[in-house]
Image (spheres, rainbow, N blue to C red):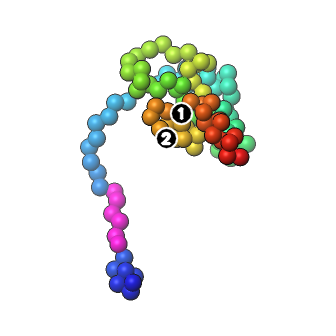
Amino acid sequence: MAEEIDNPTRYIEGATKKVSVNVYERNPMARKKCLEHYGFSCVICGFDFEKVFGELGIGFIHVHHIIELIQIGKEYEIDPINDLRPVCPNCHAMLHKKKPAFTVEELVEIINDNR
């Protein structure tokens, strides 16, 4: 035990490596239309960045694709009202915690079951 205190395990981070990934283009006008329709509160948990962070939070929210772009796999015409939803970063991460992603409705149910 004393050895562990004298010689703590070291954790090294920060090395660089090259990674090749596909990046899917997002249409900023689709995001804008989605947010004009749904507003800036998370449709899953109701979190509103402006209410919590004031001026710093104005306009901040993630926008989730109901059908993941990776599943579509090609360029397509998006309907901002039917295909997108505003979600906070925490809920967005939870939506993608499994493959395929949870639906918005499934995550709302999980939250409600745990309150």
Q: Residue extending furthest left?
A: 18
Q: Is residue 3 above or below residue 25?
A: below
Looking at the image, which residue is at 46% across and 31% down?
100
Residue highlighted by disc 1: 102
Q: Secondary structure at mark 1?
A: loop
Looking at the image, which residue is at 60% across and 36% down?
107
Residue 65, position as x, y percentages in the image: 52, 26
The secondary structure that most of the magenta stretch takes on is loop
Q: Relative to the observer, which residue lies in front, 89 or 51?
A: 89
Q: Relative to the observer, which residue lies in front, 102 or 88?
A: 102
Residue 80, position as x, y percentages in the image: 58, 19
Q: Secondary structure at mark 2?
A: loop
Question: In screen coordinates, is 93 left or right of 50?
Answer: left
Quadrant in which the N terminus is drawn: bottom left
Part of the protein shown in magenta: 9-14
Residue 6, position as x, y percentages in the image: 36, 84
- Which amino acid type corresponds to the residue marked 1 in the rendered image? Phe
Q: Residue extending furthest top?
A: 77
Q: Residues within 10 Å of mark 1 (few under 14, many from 20)?
A: some
**In the rendered structure, are the residues bearing label 2 and label 1 in contact, judged by CB atoms less than 8 Å apart?**
yes
Q: Is residue 63 magenta?
A: no
Q: Is residue 13 magenta?
A: yes
Question: In screen coordinates, is 92 left or right of 108?
Answer: left
Give the mark nearer the N terminus: 2 vs 1. 2
Question: In screen coordinates, is 92 left or right of 14?
Answer: right
Residue 103 occupies quadrant: top right
Q: CA distance from mark 2 to mark 1?
A: 8 Å
Q: Residue extending furthest front?
A: 113
Residue highlighted by disc 2: 97
Task: Using the rendered image of the protein, determine whether residue 81 is visible from the camera's viewpoint.
Answer: yes
Residue 66, position as x, y percentages in the image: 54, 25
